[in-house]
Amino acid sequence: MRKGGPQSFDGEQYQARFDALAASGESVHGEADFVSGYFPESVLDAGCGTGRVALELARRGILVVGVDRDPSMLAVARRRAEQEGEGSLSLQVSYVEADLVGLDLGVDFDLVVMAGNVPLFTDEGTERDLVESVGGHVRSGGLLVAGFQLGRSYRLSDYDAHCKRAGLVLEERYATWDKKPYGERADYAVSVHRRP
């Protein structure tokens, strides 16, 4: 969240927007398609919101932990997982209410994803700590994947520097989740950093 401290969302309203897109025939699983293309067995969905990405990854047989600090968003995520799987997904997806800055789950993942502008929603000035915290959950040889709008207060060069400080090396960058090539005029970036 930007200046002014934690911002609260209405999880039902947030999810309704994606439900409407899906009902109209729009694909709402671009991030999950992107992530599953790296064939991870375990994923940390950092800033999971209502669990749209986490739940879709779990449907694909991936073990997922979703973390968000907004209780309204997590309430929707948990309800959706229960409704869809009637318990069958309970071994594949779980949710934790916590701030990503300073996060320490005590476990590493094949891939950590920050979809939906997560670095832009953290408290201003804590971006480096955010990247170090979530990046610290990437196992050796694993990936940190993040997509966010450019041209705002958090620059892509700063993000890359924060990843480098966290021991992560840029491997790929795209302009969209469907892997449109990244160029100087792009207004969005999906970055893939690897822990050597």
Image (spheres, grey):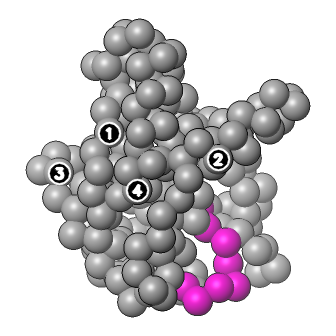
Q: CA distance from mark 3 to mark 1?
A: 12 Å
- The residues tagged by marks 4 and 2 sit, at their Cα atoms, a distance apart of 13 Å
Residue 144 horizontal side relative to residue 9, left or right: left
Q: Give the residues in magenta.
A: 146-154
On whether residue 108 falls in the magenta region, the answer is no
Q: Earlier in the sequence, mark 3 or mark 1?
A: 1
In front: mark 3 or mark 1?
1
Query: Residue at label 2?
Result: 13
**Picture residue at 34% right of the left edge, 72% below the top:** 130
Judged from this view, the residue extending furthest toward the left is 106
Q: Are marks 4 and 2 in contact (CB under 8 Å)?
A: no
Which of the two discs, 2 and 3, labels the residue nearer the N terminus? 2
Disc 2 secondary structure class: helix
The residue carrying mark 4 is 70
Q: Is residue 4 left or right of residue 31?
A: left
Instruction: Please state which of the two labelled residues, at mark 4 or mark 3, is closer to the viewer.
Output: 4
Q: List the residue tagged with mark 1.
A: 95
Viewer-nearest of labels 1 and 4?
Answer: 4
Please report the residue visible at 29 percent of the width from the left and 50 percent of the height from the top: 97
- What amino acid is found at the position of numbered circle 2 in the picture? Gln
Say which residue appears at 31% left-offset and 33% top-offset: 94
